[in-house]
Amino acid sequence: MDDEKLPLTYHLAELRTRIVRILLAWIVCALLAWNFSELIFSYLLEPAVAALGAGERTLQAIAPTEIFFTYLKCAALAGFVIALPVIFWQIWAFVAPGLYSSERNAIVPFVLVSTLLFAGGAIFGYTMVFPLMFNFFTGFDSEFVESAWTMREVFNLTTRLFLAFGIAFELPVLVFFLSITGIVDARTLLRGTPYAVLGVFVTAAILTPPDWVSQIFLAIPMIALYLLGVGVAFVFGGSKRKRADGEEVPS
């Protein structure tokens, strides 16, 4: 690797370039998704509508601009998901100069695995957790009160959980990255499992609504993924990080 230390201004300029490319990819994908925003919205909020009773009750719009801006946010969410490969590619391209040459070549596996993990987390939340959560909330209906949700509030809650599950499933990538960069070794990560479990449950409580269903369903996969990341770090992180004496990471 190159021993030359790059100035801070170079890193800031590089970061700005990567952020601009991410935003451009996001905007372009969001514009493409706008034409399908109503279809995407109906599919995304299907668990909520089903919990209300399909055909019996519908979501409400109580403000003149609510439908338009909710569809706009829906297109932005879809654009973000579609642009994920570009986003992960730019993230790796930014951190790659600080890695060893053999690690830089892992950009394609990184982008592929990161995208699949995010998609897997979002799909897991959508198919397994959302129906249980919305049914849990409608379970408090009675002869005195009946659920009548607005599309904005349901969309905001769904988006929050959608992103929470997607980001949470990136945990193995984060653990692996911490290991290969030498920030924390795999054995230390394994010894810190009890603290990681505590942190996972605290994070799940913050990211999810105040119901135990979504908290448990987010926390348990995160713990399993953390251990998976530690296992991968043991296989690829420790010994792989021992390089030739002359190879240094530039600042």
Image (spheres, helix red, strand yellow):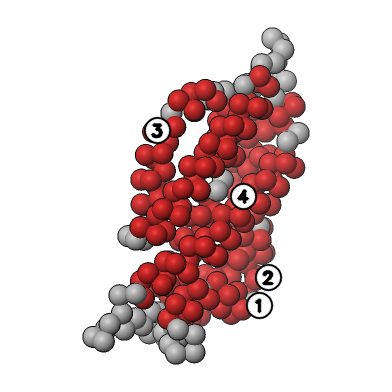
Task: Name the mark on residue 32.
Answer: 2
Image coordinates of residue 245 in percent, x first then y, are 69, 9
Residue matched to label 1: 35
Which element type, helix, strand or loop, lies under badge 1?
loop
Q: Residue at x 49, y 85 (%)?
A: 54
Residue matched to label 3: 194
Q: Where 4 sits versus 190, above or below? A: above
Q: Which image quadrant is residue 152 in?
A: bottom left
- Dot 4 or dot 3, earlier in sequence: 4
Q: Residue at x 61, y 78 (%)?
A: 39
Are the residues flagged by discs 1 and 2 in contact, CB closer than 8 Å? Answer: yes
Horizontal side, residue 15 vs residue 85: left or right: left
Amino acid type, mark 2: Leu
Task: Name the mark on residue 117.
Answer: 4
Q: Residue at x 56, y 54 (%)?
A: 121
Q: Which image quadrant is residue 228 in?
A: top right
Q: Which image quadrant is residue 231 in?
A: top right
The tally of labels here is: 4
**Where's the N terminus, which quadrant?**
top right
Separation (CA) of disc 1 from disc 3: 47 Å
Q: Nearer the viewer, mark 3 or mark 2?
A: 3
- Dot 4 or dot 2, earlier in sequence: 2
